[in-house]
Image: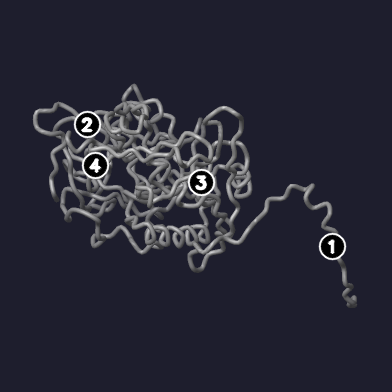
Amino acid sequence: MSLSAKKISPKKNGVASLHLTKHKKADGEVPKGVDMQYVPALYKAFSDVDGDYGNYDLANRPYDGQKIRYIIIHDSEVSYQGTINTFLQQTYVSAHYVIRSSDGQITKMVDPKDVAWQAGNWYMNSHSIGIEHEGYAVEGATWYSEPMYRASAKLVNYLAKKYEIPLDREHIIGHEEVPGLTPSRQVAMHWDPAAYWDWAHYFKLLGAPFTKNQPKTSGKKDANIVTINPDYATNQPEVTYGAQQLEKKSANFIYLYKAPSFNAALIGDPLLNPNGTGTTALNDWGNKAVTGRSYYKVDEAGDWTAIDFGGQKAWFYNPKGVNTVKGSGLLVTPKKGADSIPVYGSAYPEAAAYEKYGIAPVGMAPIYRMPAGQFYVAEKAVGSDYYYAKLFNAPETYRVVSGTDQYYQISYNHRIAFVKKSDVRVLYH
């Protein structure tokens, strides 16, 4: 049986009362082959109090002097629509893009020229683009779908080309690899997308796999620089969360021990684990070396390899080099005569740089100290800067404060960090 179609006229009068999210087609910044919509994040003054606004800051990156150097990979810990809704409310958080698990649909919410409030570190916010992926870290691969990986890789490839961001793990990083600005913030930093994000697969999709022939932006190949690269499919370590032993599944990290033995204790981050010993907890990032990150090899013993990691000598199981490939880059070590040097969570300017703007200097508290005799893989030195933006919709008051201090970004532990150029000696490898 078939029914004849009838012409109808929809009643639109009551639609406004439903308060539906308005979706727009994304602007011209759409990578080929992706489904992208535009839902602008909330930008609003929340009260008459200066500085009480959200959920992001206006800027003109990179033309205002703030180079976009990083793309930060997040998981949302809420649903796709829930993430979008979060950025539409008075939450003081946002990200530039949100990606749906089921089909890889992308919602753009903050223009890359503006500064999203996404990393928990103002310096990193001002130099990065944040991408939220629908998912939950503990459930991992259940949410990190192939359509999501492919859509994300297309987006990242597009952004990396446009903003000249290197396709490596020093610049394409997880939220878990962003440092805190202070010791207390370091402990409180997020740890997503966590163990079940397949970095090796993701970088193959980006066209930059972790192989012995992978080009780097600086330095030469060196036998003593190793890049972590376990086989994701077969690497299934024991992991706990809370009081629960999680089901064994593919993971992107290798455990680090105090000695070359599985009977040895796991190393502990001094801030996360004041007693000095780490755990198998998913959110205990202090003893986990993650795929794609590079470190300096300091020793070998049988099937075990040791690296400098967070001020410690850290051992991991590596028979015949199965969990690593050769790395490259610069190496930095404390300058001669220094017992240790400060390690920071930002590359902020010296106090004098703020004076000409009439801005109070932003203090920097070291989060760690790098001991003499240790070596860390570094990127080329960058200048120091701070983005001053304190008022709602008042770009005439915003300033990029540039200093004379220079910093090296280093792969210090699970997270990246920064050391002053004046504090280190550089080895070109």
For disc 4, the marked residue is 408
Whether residues under marks 2 and 4 lie with C-beta atoms below 8 angstroms apart, the answer is no
Disc 2 packing (10 Å; few <14; some 14–19; many ≥20): many
For disc 1, the marked residue is 10
Q: Which amino acid does label 3 sit on?
A: Ala
Disc 4 packing (10 Å; few <14; some 14–19; many ≥20): many
Between tags 1 and 2, which lies in front?
Answer: 1
Q: Distance between the residues labelled 3 and 4?
A: 26 Å
Q: How far apart are marks 1 and 2 (CA)?
A: 68 Å
Q: In the picture shown, does residue 104 fall above or below 378?
A: below
Question: Which quadrant holds residue 404?
Answer: top left
Q: In the picture shown, does residue 208 fall above or below 369?
A: below
Q: How far apart are marks 4 and 1 (CA)?
A: 61 Å
Q: Which of marks 2 and 4 is nearer the N terminus?
A: 2
Circle 2: element type: strand
**Image location of residue 300, percent across then percent down:** 17, 43
